[in-house]
Amino acid sequence: MNGTTRFTPMVDSGPLRPLALLIAAFDVAVGWALVAEIVVMVAVVAIQVALRYLFNSSINWADELARLCFVWSIFTAIPLGLKGGAHIGIEMLVVRFPAHLRSATARLVALLGAAMLLLVAWESAVMAWDQWDELMASMPASAAWFIVPLAVCGVHGALHLIWQAITGAQHVNPELQAELS
């Protein structure tokens, strides 16, 4: 994305402060969850490899837990990518628009993206609810835990896109996020 189509950060004051605080709190929580997911995944895989090759033994649930952490880490990281503009955008046409039309188009696309993510969140929540009684093959936990991160990603990503649609800013003020850390 080149500098002409990037959003500029906006100070989070006034009536949008509660939304900015909500998004910043979500970002901090997801950031810490992402660290925990990756630590658990790496630790479980390392222990599993050591047990297999050093002791000719293994943990039954290690692969499933590592896969669950991987799925969660991917879907919890997506909204953080949206926040920083690290998503794919096709700009062949939009870069030829005047500045005010580029801004309006970016806001409309953000709003449509938010609506789609909310639909994904809703449908994922429905699917998780329907599958909650199905257990994983090697762990006494619901298989729906593989679907829940889609709902989390949908809501969190939609909040970022709603922020972009309303303010034209790509993310909330970094100082506000630092207050919550």
Image (cartoon, rainbow, N blue to C red):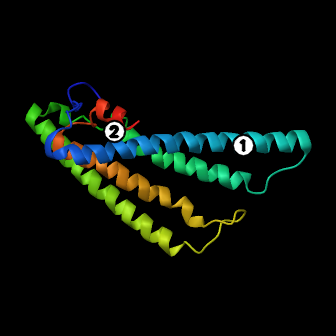
Q: Residue furthest front?
A: 179
Marks 1 and 2: in contact by CB < 8 Å? Answer: no
Check disc 1 and give the amino acid type.
Val
Q: Residues within 10 Å of mark 1 (few under 14, many from 20)?
A: some
Q: Is residue 26 above or below residue 60?
A: above
Q: Position of residue 111 (x, y in %)?
A: 22, 51
Q: Nearer the viewer, residue 82 or 106?
A: 82
Q: How many numbered discs, if any?
A: 2
Side of 22 relative to 4 (left or right): right
Q: Amino acid at mark 2?
A: Lys
In terms of image quadrants, where is residue 78? Answer: top left
Q: Residue at x 79, y 41 (%)?
A: 49
Q: Residue 38 vs residue 43: left or right?
A: left
- Give the percent coordinates (x, y) of residue 44: 71, 45
Residue tagged by mark 1?
45
Q: Secondary structure at mark 1?
A: helix
The first of marks 2 and 1 along the sequence is: 1
Query: Where is residue 101 shown, x and y percent of the image?
Result: 10, 38
Q: Quadrant of residue 51?
A: top right
Local crowd size for mark 2, using a 10 Å CA cut-off: few (<14), some (14–19), many (≥20): many
Q: Residue at x 36, y 32 (%)?
A: 178
The quadrant in which residue 144 appears is: bottom right
Vertical order, 169 against 110 (above or below): above
Q: Quadrant of the N terminus?
A: top left
- Above or below residue 96? Residue 36 is below
Would you say residue 44 is visible in this rendering?
A: yes
Q: Is residue 123 above or below residue 29?
A: below
Residue 98 appearing in the image:
no
Q: CA distance from mark 2 to mark 1?
A: 30 Å
> What secondary structure is marked by label 2?
helix
Residue 14 lies left or right of residue 45; in this view the side is: left
Q: Which mark is residue 83?
A: 2
